[in-house]
Image (cartoon, rainbow, N blue to C red):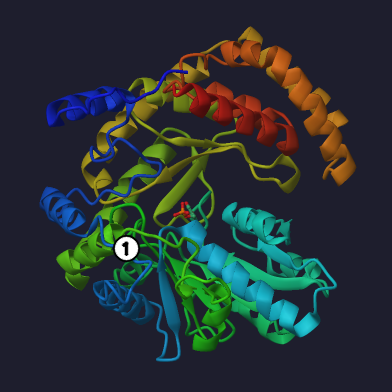
Amino acid sequence: MGPVLGKKGLSRDEILEKLREYERNDLDPYGGRLFTIAFEPGVEELREIVFEVFKRFAFKNMLDFTEFPSSIKMEKDIIDYAVFLMHGDDQVAGTFTFGGTESVFLAVKSARDSFILKKGFLTMPEIVIPVTGHPCYDKAAEYMGMRVKRVKIDENTFTADPNAINEALTDNTAMIVGSAPNWPFGTIDPIKDLAEIAADKGLWLHVDACVGGFVLPFMRELGDKVPEFDFRVEGVSSISLDPHKYAYTPIGASVILFRNKFSKIFSQFANLRWPGYPIVNPAVLSSRSEAPLAAAWATLHFFGQDGYMELARKIISARRKIVGGFKDAGYSVLGEPTVIAAFTSPELNIFKLSDEMAKRGWALLPQKGIESMKIPPSIHLTITPIHDKTAEAMISDLKECTETVKNMPLTEAEALLSIFSSVFGLLAPAEMDIASLAKLYTEAERFLKVHGGEILTALGLERGFPKEMGQIFQLLASVPPEIAELLANYVVIEMFHRGV
Ligand SMILES: Cc1ncc(COP(=O)(O)O)c(C=O)c1O
């Protein structure tokens, strides 16, 4: 492999041109055609301010807040606002992090350490979570030597089933999680019921309001039915909420709040055992640019409370159009949608639908469901203010794409897929033990060395990820999760390795 950098550096124009070329296949996050992970308020003036702020703070490092005390001031304002929205008192303490996953890591670490201090190191602490909870809890558990129990949900409301959660608790349970709302369906878990269970058993209850924290309070004021999920509910130990979702700040902004200021201590890291400077990290990373913090501060202050109310009104209006349009096209909605809505149709292949919509420039997320838990495959839409402008055009294309997909014959590949999934379903145990996993990884390494290239070609991945990912999602949905995860990891390693 040759060096990527030439002997001489590039000029400003050359740099910009090269990056423009790299960006060529990116989707546009501002245009209102993504119903996935772009949270777009549709306000151009804000973008200019944010870019200015980014420039000012990019090279200031949050690692040493004594050198850059502006970071403490901006963080304090953002945390105070989050505490206000979540109805916390002055005992609530928080940390600004770079994302929901990082906030969740800090909550999980605090819950785990509190548990260990009570019970000792003898058991593997467990997190009990409705199956709709975000995978960042499994990620945190993998990093921190814990186990996650994913529990069935209520099949009518698509929210947590408190009885099922209660039944899953053991002496090893360190933490219960509920979402406001969850990502797959946008439904809000019954936090009050979960809190009663947690209080009764003396367990840590984390509320994942990463999606809803900065928007549901406004939607409630506008008349949406939003059950209580914040610190007014006795028994809630911590709440995560992300400015980089529904406060529309640039990516890299989340908040974790602890009801009890002292329990924040388990989420921090301090080390004075080396010959260097004293380290105290409030978050997972050590060196962090101040830019995302400053940009979040600027965005919050740009909108103010009235601005956020207006944006929530636009979401409600867009949601009305989207839910009405999907129903007209023959779909049914799963549970009570909030800022996220998910739709299903028994007679339609939703993976093909998402591919057809992608051909017309719309990004919607197909979701596989879980047959054994009576959760059907569905199509997910994250609804943001910009969609108030684009919803009607999207629905018009949806209606046409729905007809196209209904009339598509079964392809050879699909017939193969269904055989594939039934065979794999027979082979794979529900949950693999370490020995079977070890065997799977050894065999997989050998197999992928020989056949990996052919697999990538068969999936159409030899030149990078295609815009239409439906068939790949369908393949992953048709094999057991252990194998799908291995395959997905392999594909991503290869794509990054090749840089395509
Ligand atoms: C409910 C929920 N929690 C946590 C996360 C993780 O957030 P992030 O992607 O910012 O790490 C997400 C992301 O979509 C989410 O939907």
The residue sitting at 72% across, 73% down in the picture is: 174
Total numbered badges shown on the rendered structure: 1
Decide if ligand 1 comes within 8 Å of the CB at mark 1: no
Q: Quadrant of residue 117?
A: bottom right
The residue sitting at 40% across, 60% down in the picture is: 287
207 vs 299, nearest the viewer: 299
Q: Quadrant of residue 247?
A: bottom left
133 vs 13, nearest the viewer: 13
- The answer, for residue 213, to whether it is visible in the render is yes
190 vs 492, nearest the viewer: 492
Q: Identify the residue at the far right of this view.
A: 435
List x then y, in percent, for residue 27: 31, 31
Q: In the figure, 494 relative to 316: above or below? A: above
- Where is the C terminus found, in terms of image quarters? top left
List x then y, in percent, for residue 267: 55, 74
Disc 1: which residue: 61
Q: In the figure, 487 relative to 99: above or below? A: above
* Three-letter code, disc 1: Asn
321 vs 97, nearest the viewer: 97
Q: In the figure, 375 relative to 222: above or below? A: above
The residue sitting at 32% across, 58% down in the picture is: 289
Q: Quadrant of residue 92?
A: bottom left
List x then y, in percent, for residue 373: 72, 48
The residue sitting at 34% across, 62% down in the picture is: 243
Mark 1 lies on a secondary structure that is loop
